Image: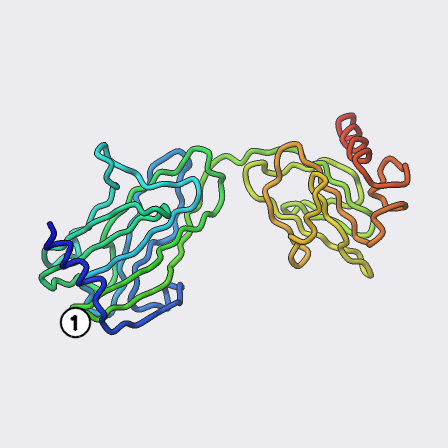
Amino acid sequence: MKQTIWFAMILFCMEASSLHAQNTDVSTLDNTIYIESQTVEAGSQTTLSVKLKNTLSVRDFQFNLYLPEGMSFAMDDDGWCLAELTPARLTGMKTFETAVQEDGSLLVLCYSLRNYVFSGTDGEVCTITINVEENVKPGNHTASIKNIELTESSSNSITLDAVDFTLTVEGETLSAPLALSCDQKGSVAVNGVVVTADNKAVDVASNAPSTFVFTPNEGNKLAMVKLNGIDVTEQVVDNSLTLTVPEGSYMMVAFDSSAGTGSSLDVNQDGSVDISDVVFLVNYILNH
């Protein structure tokens, strides 16, 4: 056992000549470990196919796999990660090890003490099974393969910082009404549905991001966006805002700098914009 660990340290820690790559677009990389983006289902297990793309004679590889929030590495009854080396590209005996790290990533090591290289130039080299929690929000989630190191038969190494991929979670999108008010100097498109100066309720997802596009009328500009009384104007980029709206929320939008007396946000006509306008707006929606 000690001898195996010693040889592994030699293989992965030796001061060999190294080529560094920071490009994470797999189509532009000649030698890398990658996982293709795919769709997963909330409340299920999914097996990820880890692939090696190579133009060089690759003998060993190692990397750290980072999963998004709400996903974890599946374990067997003995507490070992459900990960397996794929035999299709093997030309001889290899050692394959995995271990969950303190930062939550999975460290994956594969090496040969007899200089056996992988056959072929592209394809699966191992599989890793993950758990997708039931309460993961539907939508796209980014996972990342980091600290990639490939070692050639000559012991030269190739390192890459990160290669990302997307796990798209399928699931029911829950809908909830959003009380929305904007003044007469612009409009708001909520997931493509345009809302003008009318004070109204629009349906948005309560468990997935919604996109708001603010369009000022000619000669005006967006001045303020508040969600549940909190100013979120700084989060708006190019008049667009994407966020998850909690159930029972209200949004107020102004397209000029005079969001005080005289603003159409003063829905109860008391000369100021405050919580009383919100109460008025909610009561209006409930009774219409």
Where is residue 9 drawn, in percent x and y?
19, 59
| Quadrant position of residue 56 | bottom left
Q: Quick one: SS at disc 1?
A: loop
Q: Is residue 243 above or below residue 283?
A: below
Q: Residue at x 65, y 36 (%)?
A: 203
Q: Residue at x 49, y 40 (%)?
A: 138
Q: How many marks?
A: 1
**Colour scheme shown:** rainbow
Residue in the foreground of this view, choosing between 168 and 267: 267
Residue 145 relative to residue 110: left or right: right
Q: Residue at x 20, y 68 (%)?
A: 152
Image quarter in which the C terminus is found: top right
Where is residue 103 drawn, in percent x and y?
37, 48
Q: Residue furthest top?
A: 287
Residue in the foreground of this view, choosing between 34 and 115: 115
Q: Residue at x 81, y 35 (%)?
A: 277
Q: Is residue 9 above or below residue 102?
A: below
| Quadrant position of residue 165 | bottom left
Residue 30 relative to residue 224: left or right: left
Residue 26 relative to residue 56: left or right: right
Amino acid type assigned to the residue bearing label 1 in the image: Ser
Q: Which residue is mark 1?
A: 154
